[in-house]
Image (cartoon, rainbow, N blue to C red):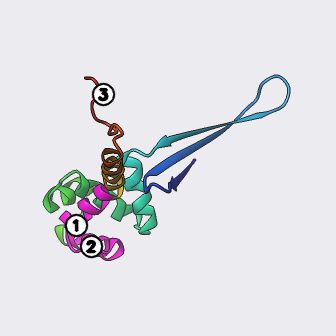
């Protein structure tokens, strides 16, 4: 499996599998748009977050408060804050809001721009109603 940034700016996931059938082996490749959860995982890996920082980031993306994260991970509030500082530095953001926005816009902004181009070109938008509906 691989995640690839397409020319359009959208992330796609490639899955490959070896198929053993009669005769020669064959390979199947599946290409599909990356889902938001996959994008978050990709970004966390690209930012070189530690496993614990990734856990904290997942909670942040779900809107969890510092106290809730500390309770769930059985760590102190101070430790959560230290992880947050490290995450913000690695992701090059200043706040939880910036972090969520960065993850959101990495996934959705290319789609919004594509729909803008499609609208200007008179084509139907992706994710919108079909013509005549």
Q: Give the magenta-colored segment's residue range.
A: 79-105
Quadrant of the rendered image containing residue 75: bottom left
Q: Secondary structure at mark 1?
A: helix
Which residue is identified by label 2? 93
Q: Secondary structure at mark 2?
A: loop
Q: Which mark is residue 131?
A: 3
Q: Main secondary structure of the magenta part?
A: helix
Q: Residue 55 location in percent, x, y? A: 33, 57
Q: Residue at 36% across / 50% down in the picture?
A: 114
Most distant residue in the right direction: 23
Which residue is identified by label 1? 98
Left or right: residue 56 compared with residue 3: left
The answer to whether the residue labelled 2 contacts the one labelled 3, judged by CB atoms less than 8 Å apart, is no
Looking at the image, is mark 3 or mark 1 earlier in the sequence? 1
Q: Residue at 27% across / 30% down in the picture?
A: 129
Q: CA distance from mark 2 to mark 3?
A: 41 Å
Q: Residue 61 location in percent, x, y? A: 25, 55
Q: Residue at 28% across / 35% down in the picture?
A: 128
Q: Residues within 10 Å of mark 2 (few under 14, many from 20)?
A: some
Is residue 100 in the magenta section? Answer: yes
Q: Residues within 10 Å of mark 1 (few under 14, many from 20)?
A: some
Q: Nearer the viewer, mark 2 or mark 3?
A: 3
Q: Nearer the viewer, mark 3 or mark 1?
A: 3
């Amino acid at each position: 499996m691989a995640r690839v940034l397409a020319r359009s700016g959208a992330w796609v996931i490639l899955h490959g599998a070896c198929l053993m059938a009669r005769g020669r082996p064959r390979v199947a490749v599946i290409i599909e748009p990356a889902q938001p959860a996959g994008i978050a995982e990709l970004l966390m890996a690209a930012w070189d977050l530690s496993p614990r920082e990734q856990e904290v980031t997942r909670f942040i993306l779900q809107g969890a408060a510092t106290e809730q994260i500390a309770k769930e991970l059985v760590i102190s509030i101070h430790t959560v804050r230290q992880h947050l500082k490290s995450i913000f530095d690695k992701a090059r953001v200043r706040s939880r809001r910036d972090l969520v926005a960065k993850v959101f816009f990495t996934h959705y902004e290319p789609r919004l721009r594509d729909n803008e181009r499609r609208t200007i070109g008179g084509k139907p938008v992706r994710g919108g109603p079909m013509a005549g509906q």
